[in-house]
Amino acid sequence: MDAHDFPLDLLEAQTCWYVTYGELADAEPAASPTAARRRLLELSGRIAGHPFWRGPAGTPAARMELKEIAHAQAAHAGEDW
């Protein structure tokens, strides 16, 4: 897999998406999921509409690599909680 130089804001948004998703999944049943769901929608829009995807590096493979890197960062961040 080729290494990509992802813009920091894109990588941060994808990492925040995984962190927020994890928080939503781990939330108490009585807790309102509205704020987390809104955050996921906002982050999804920011990620999907990022200008990086319009360039030559914005391939499906790059999207998968971004997700893998961000997922690993989110998992590592979870260890610090």
Image (cartoon, rainbow, N blue to C red):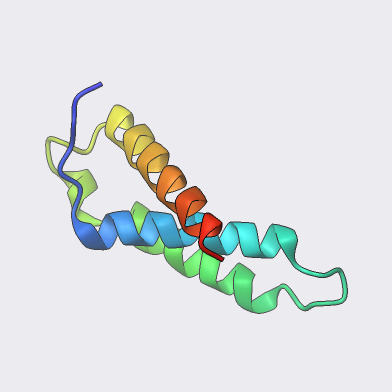
**Position of 36 compared to 64: left or right?**
right
Judged from this view, the residue extending furthest toward the left is: 56
Q: Quadrant of residue 67?
A: top left
Residue 36 drawn above or below residue 11: below
- Tell me what residue is drawn at x 33 percent, y 34 percent: 65
**Position of 37 compared to 46: left or right?**
right
Residue 7 drawn above or below residue 58: below
Judged from this view, the residue extending furthest toward the top is: 1
Judged from this view, the residue extending furthest toward the right is: 30
Q: Quadrant of residue 27?
A: bottom right
- Tell me what residue is drawn at x 38 percent, y 33 percent: 64
Q: Nearer the viewer, residue 69 or 78?
A: 78
**Position of 12 compared to 54: left or right?**
right
Q: Nearer the viewer, residue 73 or 13?
A: 73
Q: Quadrant of residue 34?
A: bottom right
- Tell me what residue is drawn at x 46 percent, y 45 percent: 71
Quadrant where the image shows the C terminus: bottom right
- Tell me what residue is drawn at x 30 percent, y 54 percent: 11
Q: Nearer the viewer, residue 28 or 81?
A: 81
